[in-house]
Image: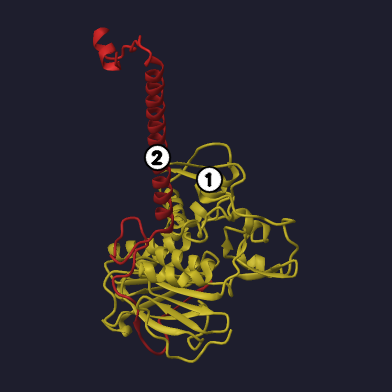
Chain colours: A yellow, B red
């Protein structure tokens, strides 16, 4: 099938933009219905900004023992704990309190609209409590967090939702599918003839001509993390949403943007976030585990790893 | 009388305390006391070695698990999964952007 056969749908979700592409146009409506259902379920399970979410209930019950959870929330929490384990704790779900301290305690559009706000916490935040203080009993469908822990699943939930949507749509609508949730991309089913064509850039909402590189993928996922987009000011200080667990502060990285391709969007996003936090050490880490990645420094110079295609385009000034 | 002669005289049963009745008895007691001390020390060193090995093994296992060295096979059990094929070069605009949100 060719690009001309692909149906496209764009909609808002999780405070960002979703793009849904399917290779069988008649399956588009069915695919959108599946995506809407899946994403609504994920939002209800793990939104940090909904008092009725399972995540909000769990955070409220910190230090009060096991809480019953749904199978979906168990999967989401397991994905976050797996990301923490795979990155030696660099992608840690216990950064909730640090984010609240930076004023990120509501939908990001409201954070940005609030402008330069005073800090919610005074003094240094310090290291996050650590993912080992989050406990999950998948068989018993219960979870508990220790006193003082606040969980945020923002580093993995969106990518996990993309993987889930792609998998279910491909199976139930019987088509090839690409879904992008704010630039976290998962594909499943038979791809177009030449693969799915993706522009890798700083901002998922950038125009097609934005500086970056175009690549194709046929399976798995591709995700990009950046310190330049979900950024705001607190007390006159520029901050962003990628928290370094060692300090509880926004990561001070040599990379402004990292894109990674992996076997799933969740793994791609785990690695791209960890790479931002690890800084220069990310290059050897990505090489060692064989992950194709594209890392952009603040001056626009680019490094690639493990089979990511060479970038012969012009440099990218920040 | 030697220590072994003394044991035989006493019936030779295991665990019996040897008796000495010669002028060399004091020296023999010293020797046996030394043997027991060396034996105890050897056991303690052995146990300490086993404990240290267990601690080091545990620490290394934790570190290996945490840093997830998952080299190239596509599906490394529990590790980050690399793509079946790396991204391929293309040109022009994309069907969709991958960027931060």
Task: Output the chain of dot 1.
Answer: A
Between residue A246 and residue A187, name the one nearer to us.
A246
Location of residue A307 by image quarter: bottom left
Q: Up-down: is A2 above or below A228?
A: below
Residue at 53% x, 36% y is: A65
Report helix, strand or loop for mark 2: helix
Location of residue B12 by image quarter: top left
Residue at 45% x, 74% y is: A259
Spot occupied by residue A106 in the image (x, y as percentages of width and height): 63, 60
Name the residue that disc number 2 marks. Answer: B49
Residue at 66% x, 65% y is: A111
Spot occupied by residue B24 in the image (x, y as percentages of width and height): 37, 16
Residue B13 visible in the snapshot: no
Q: Up-down: is A286 above or below A79?
A: below
Q: Quadrant of the C terminus of chain A?
A: bottom right
Q: Quadrant of the N terminus of chain A?
A: bottom left
Between residue A43 and residue A125, name the one nearer to us.
A125
Q: Kindly report which numbered mark, 1 or 2, lies closer to the viewer in this rendering.
A: 2
Spot occupied by residue A291 in the image (x, y as percentages of width and height): 37, 70
Task: Output the chain of dot 2.
Answer: B
Name the residue that disc number 1 marks. Answer: A133
Spot occupied by residue A37 in the image (x, y as percentages of width and height): 42, 59
């Amino acid at each position: 099938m060719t690009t001309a056969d692909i149906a496209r749908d764009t909609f808002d979700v999780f405070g960002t933009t979703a793009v849904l592409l399917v290779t069988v146009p008649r399956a588009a409506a069915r695919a959108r219905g599946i995506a809407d259902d899946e994403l609504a379920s994920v939002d209800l399970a793990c939104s940090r900004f909904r008092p009725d979410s399972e995540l909000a209930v769990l955070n409220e019950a910190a230090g009060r023992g096991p809480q019953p959870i749904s199978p979906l929330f168990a999967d989401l929490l397991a994905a976050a704990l797996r990301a923490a384990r795979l990155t030696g704790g660099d992608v840690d779900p216990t950064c909730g309190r640090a984010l609240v301290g930076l004023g990120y305690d509501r939908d990001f559009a409201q954070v940005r609209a609030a402008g330069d706000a005073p800090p919610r916490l005074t003094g240094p935040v310090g290291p996050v409590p650590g993912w080992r203080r989050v406990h999950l009993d998948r068989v018993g469908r219960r979870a508990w967090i220790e006193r003082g822990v606040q969980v945020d699943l923002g580093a993995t939930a969106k990518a996990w939702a993309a993987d889930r949507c792609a998998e279910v749509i491909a199976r139930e609508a019987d088509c090839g599918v690409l879904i992008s949730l704010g630039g976290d991309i998962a594909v499943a089913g038979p791809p177009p003839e030449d693969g799915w064509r993706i522009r890798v850039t700083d901002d998922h909402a950038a125009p097609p001509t934005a500086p970056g590189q175009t690549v194709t993928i046929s399976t798995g996922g591709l995700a990009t993390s950046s310190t330049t987009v979900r950024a705001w000011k607190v007390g006159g200080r520029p901050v962003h949403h990628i928290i370094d667990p060692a300090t509880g502060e926004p990561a001070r990285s040599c990379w402004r943007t990292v894109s990674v391709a992996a076997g799933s969007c969740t793994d791609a996003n785990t690695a791209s976030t960890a790479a931002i936090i690890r800084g220069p050490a990310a290059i050897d880490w990505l090489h060692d585990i064989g992950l194709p990645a594209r890392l952009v420094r603040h001056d626009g110079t680019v490094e690639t790893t493990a089979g990511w295609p060479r970038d012969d385009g012009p440099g990218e000034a920040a | 009388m030697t220590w072994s002669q003394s044991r035989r005289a006493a019936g030779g049963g295991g665990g019996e305390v040897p008796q000495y009745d010669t002028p060399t008895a004091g020296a023999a007691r010293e020797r046996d006391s030394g043997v027991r001390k060396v034996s105890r020390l050897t056991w303690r060193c052995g146990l300490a070695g086993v404990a240290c090995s267990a601690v080091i093994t545990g620490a290394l296992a934790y570190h290996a698990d945490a840093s997830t060295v998952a080299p190239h096979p596509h599906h490394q059990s529990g590790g980050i999964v690399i793509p079946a094929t790396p991204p391929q070069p293309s040109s022009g605009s994309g069907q969709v952007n991958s960027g931060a949100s």
